Amino acid sequence: MAISVDGETQTLLQSPSPSSSPSPSDLRCRRPVAPVAVPETPSNTSFPVDALPRDSAEQSGVETTCDSDDRMIDGNDRMEPLAVKDKQCVEGVERRQVHGTGSGQSAKFLYRASAPAHRKVKESPLSSDAIFKQSHAGLFNLCIVVLIAVNGRLIIENLMKYGLLIRTGFWFSSKSLTDWPLLMCCLTLPLFPLGAFLIEKLAWRKCIPEPLVISLHVMLTTVTIFYPVYVILRCDSAVLYGFTLMFFASIVWLKLVSYAHTNYDIRALMKSLDKDNTSSHFSGLDAEEGVNFKQLVYFMVAPTLCYQQNYPRTTCIRKSWVIRQLIKLVICTGLMSFIIEQYINPIVKNSQHPLKGNLLYAIERVLKLSVPTLYVWLCMFYCFFHLWLNILAELLRFGDREFYKDWWNAKTVEEYWRMWNMPVHKWMIRHIYFPCLRNGISKGVAILISFFVSAIFHELCIAVPCHIIKFWAFLGILFQIPLVVLTKYLQNKFRSNMVGNMIFWFFFSILGQPMCVLLYYHDVMNRKVRID
C-alpha cells in the first residue's frame, strides 16, 4: 500500500497473513527510515497518516511505486477509493490529496523505464480521418494574427507609396448641397404612411368597399417608389445621396405593402370567423377601430418590414450599451470609407471595362478587387445588420433581434438568401411566397416571382442613383436562380458541406461583387465623360 506523506511516497508491504501485525522490518524503503508502528488491520481499512513519522518521510526524499491496492490514506482517517489502476501508478499518474487542514499536496509516481509508451492505434491530428475531430481554435487565432499583420503591412505600404487618397467628390457634390429636391423628397416620405392610415381607417369603418381600398393602396405605393426615382433622375444628384433616398423609399414601400396586406388579411379572417360564429382570437385587435396610429408610427420606425399590431418588447434601454455600439458604428463606417477610397477606387480607375479589352487583364482586375470589396461588404453587413439595427431595436425596446443568421456557413446560394437578410426574407415569405402558394402557384414559380421582385428593387437602389439603367443588378439577381440549382446539385453530388460553402464564397465574393463594381463604375465614368 502506498502512503503519501508531504509529497513523498513510501511502500508498505503487508504480511501474508492479515491477522498478523507487521513488524518494523516490513516497512521497506530504498533508504532506511525510522520504524513505523502499524497496528493490525484488515486490507479494507486505512492507516492513519499521523502514525508515520513526518520528519523521516520528509528527509528520506524517496519516491517508489505503488502496489495493486487502489486506496490512499487520508489525513482524516478516511478511506477514499480512487479510480487509479496499477498500470496508472506505473505510468506516473500525478494525484493531489488533501491532508490535515486541507492544504493540497501532490503524490508523484515513477514513470518506469519498462512502462509501455505506445498502447493503442492513434491517428495523426491532421490526418484525413481525424482532422475534423480536432479543435482548430489555435489555428484560427493564428489566421487572425497573420491577417492583421499582413493587412497592417499593406496599409502602411499603401500610405507610404500613394499617401492619403480620401476625397469627397465621389460621395458628395455641390449640387446636392445647394439644390434641395432630394432632401425635400425624403422629408415628404412620411406623408405616404399617413395616407395609408387614412385608407385603412375608412376600410375598417366600411366607408369604402374592399376593391377600392386595394386600388388606393396600389396607387399610393406606386407613387411612393416612383416619386423618388423621378427626383433623383431629374436632379442629377450625387451617388450617396441618391442611394440613401432610394433606400429609404424602398423601406417605406415594403412597410406600406405589409401594412395594407396585413390589415386586409385580418379583415378577411374576421369575416370568415363571423360567418362561422366563431370568436376572434386576436386579443390586440380593436374590432371597432381596427387600426391605431401609434401602432403605425412604431411600425414605421421599428427594425422590421412585417406589420403586426403587437411586437415582443424588452423591459428597458441599456444606454451604455447603445453608446458602445455607436462608437463601433463610427469606427466601422470610417474603416469602410477608407478601404473604398484607398484601395477600391485606385483599382477600378486603372482597369478596363470587364466586357471589353483583354480577358486576362479583366480577370486580374477582378481578382485584385475581390479582397477589398469583400472587406467592404463585411463592414457594411456588420454596420447595418448588427450595429445599426440593434441600436434601433434597443432604443425602441424591440424584442425580436434576429436580423440575420449564420449565412457565412451557407452551403448553397439558396441558404444564403434565406439567412443573410432576415427582415426582407420574412417579408418575402409572408407577402410574396406563401400568398402565391395559396393561390395555386407552384413552388418554383413562387421562388421565381420572389427573385423577380428582389431584382427590381436591387436595380432601383443601384442603377437609379448611378443614373444608369443597364440592368446589371437586375440580371445579377436573376442569375441567382441557376446558381441556386447549381450549388444545390454540387452540394448533393459531393455530399460535403465544406464544398458547397466554398462554391458559395467563390461565386459570391470572388466573382460576383467585383464584377458588379467594375461594370457600374465604368458605366458611371463613361456617363460623366459624355456629360462633360
Image (cartoon, rainbow, N blue to C red):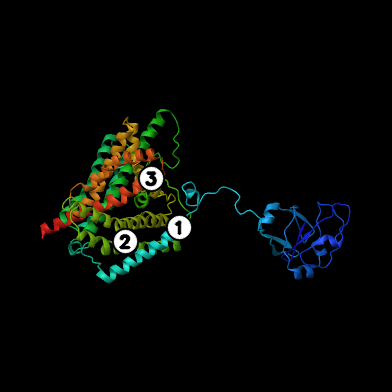
Q: Quadrant of residue 151?
A: bottom left
Sort mark 2 into few (<14), some (14-19) or many (20+) by Cα contacts within 10 Å: many
Question: Where does residue 41 sit, x and y in percent of width and height?
Answer: 85, 54
The residue pinned by badge 1 equals 139
Q: CA distance from mark 3 to mark 1?
A: 20 Å
Residue drawn at (30%, 49%) of the image = 251
Instruction: Give the mark, 2 or 1, whose residue is nearer the N terminus.
Output: 1
Image disc number at residue 336:
2
Question: Where does residue 64 sit, x and y in percent of width and height?
Answer: 73, 61
Instruction: Give the mark, 3 or 2, whose residue is nearer the N terminus.
Output: 2
- The image shows residue 481, relative to residue 54, as above or below, that is above
**Quarter of the figure with the N terminus:** bottom right
Sort mark 3 into few (<14), some (14-19) or many (20+) by Cα contacts within 10 Å: some
Instruction: Give the mark, 3 or 1, whose residue is nearer the N terminus.
Output: 1
Question: Where does residue 288 sit, x and y in percent of width and height?
Answer: 39, 39
Image disc number at residue 499:
3
Q: Nearer the viewer, residue 228 or 42?
A: 42
Q: Quadrant of residue 20?
A: bottom right
| Image position of 532 (left or right of 208) | left
